Structures are given as C-alpha cells and as structure tokens.
C-alpha cells in the first residue's frame, strides 16, 4: 500500500502529526529513560536510568518515557517520547481502552506555545489497509 504524500510524515519511526491529524496505534511497551542531546553525535541519546554514562557530555538531560507502539499507518513499530504529564494522560486513556475497547489514536495539540502529545479513544476504528499478519510475527 502506498500512502498519499500528505500522510507520509505520519508513517515514520518517530511520527510527528500536526494538530488535527491522528494516527491509529496499538500499545506495545513503555520504558523510562534518561534523554539528552549529544553535541558530538548531533542527536538525542537515550540511556537507561541506571546507566554509567557521564551525563556531563550531554545537553538538556531529562527523564522521559519511551512509548513503543504499533503504528497502523506505517504498518510497523513507532516510538513516541513522553513527558511525565503526557504519560499520565496516556495511562488514563489506556485504562479506558482496557475497560471499554475501541481504538487508540495519537495526535499532538497546541498548549500555549508548546505542542504536546495527546492520546484519545475512538469508538469506531479508522479504515486503514494493512497486511494481515500476527503482531508476534512483526516483533
């Protein structure tokens, strides 16, 4: 299946939907990590909380939660970095999903000048053409 050019940015390993765009997801796992910008590598580095790495080599060190999800638009695994408040909002939506069913949707919303990750539960699923296979085969 080829996605329309306007939806390609949603089918990436680290998707960043615009406000109003949604991605249907399935929860896989969540890990607590230490994240920091590495000037040498020019990218964000994720470390285990109990890691022996010297955080003085990193800039903007923070505690984050890496949410691993199955992205139905990608037809594969995506990773979403969550702050503490975003994690709480995700867990509330996930609890509702476990109680009532439905489909988890990931989007981003403007909150003042900042854009934050946001999750919601939809009663009816979005129609996405995906290959039929077991999640266990993919992992």
Image: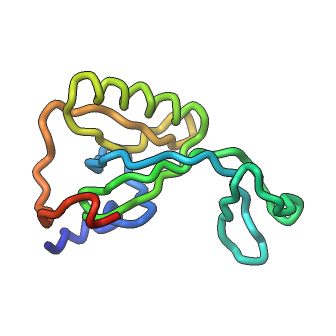
Question: In the image, is 115 to the left or to the right of 132?
Answer: right
Q: Which residue is rendered at x = 69% and y = 45% of the image?
A: 63
Is 103 positioned to the left or the right of 35 in the image?
Answer: left
User: Which residue lies at the image location 69% right of the left edge and 54% below the top edge?
Assistant: 48
Which residue is painted at 82% across and 63% down in the image?
53
Residue 82 against residue 61 in the figure, above or below: above
In the foreground, 75 or 15: 75
The colour scheme used to paint the residues is rainbow
Which residue is more in the foreground, 6 or 62?
62
Q: Looking at the picture, tell me which residue is in the foreground, 25 or 31.
A: 31
**In the depicted structure, whether residue 15 falls above or below residue 21:** below
Outermost residue toward the bottom in this view: 40
Considering every residue shown, the one lying at the far front of the view is: 136
* Image side of residue 127 versus residue 12, left or right: left
Q: Look at the picture and state if 138 lies above or below 103.
A: below
Front residue (pair 14, 113): 14
Q: Quadrant of residue 104?
A: top left
Give the image location of residue 125, x and y in percent.
Answer: 14, 41
Q: Residue at x 60, y 34 (%)?
A: 84
Q: Is residue 120 left or right of residue 85?
A: left
In which quadrant is the C terminus drawn?
Answer: bottom left
Horizontal and vertical percent position of residue 105:
30, 41
Residue 96 drawn at (x, y percent): 31, 24
Quadrant containing the N terminus in the rendered view: bottom left
Total count of labels = 0
> Residue 52: image x %, image y %?
83, 60
Question: Is the residue 86 above or below the residue 106 in the image?
Answer: above
């Amino acid at each position: 299946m080829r996605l329309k050019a306007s939806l390609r940015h949603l089918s990436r390993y680290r998707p960043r939907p615009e406000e109003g765009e949604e991605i249907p997801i399935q929860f896989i796992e969540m890990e607590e990590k230490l994240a920091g910008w590495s000037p040498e590598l020019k990218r964000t580095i994720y470390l285990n909380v109990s890691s022996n790495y010297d955080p003085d080599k990193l800039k903007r060190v923070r505690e984050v939660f890496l949410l691993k999800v199955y992205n139905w638009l990608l037809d594969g695994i995506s990773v979403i970095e969550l702050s503490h408040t975003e994690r709480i909002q995700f867990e509330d939506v996930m609890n509702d999903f476990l109680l009532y069913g439905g489909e988890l949707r990931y989007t981003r919303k403007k909150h003042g000048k900042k854009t934050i990750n946001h999750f919601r539960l939809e009663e009816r699923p979005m129609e996405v053409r995906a290959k039929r296979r077991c999640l266990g085969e993919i992992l």
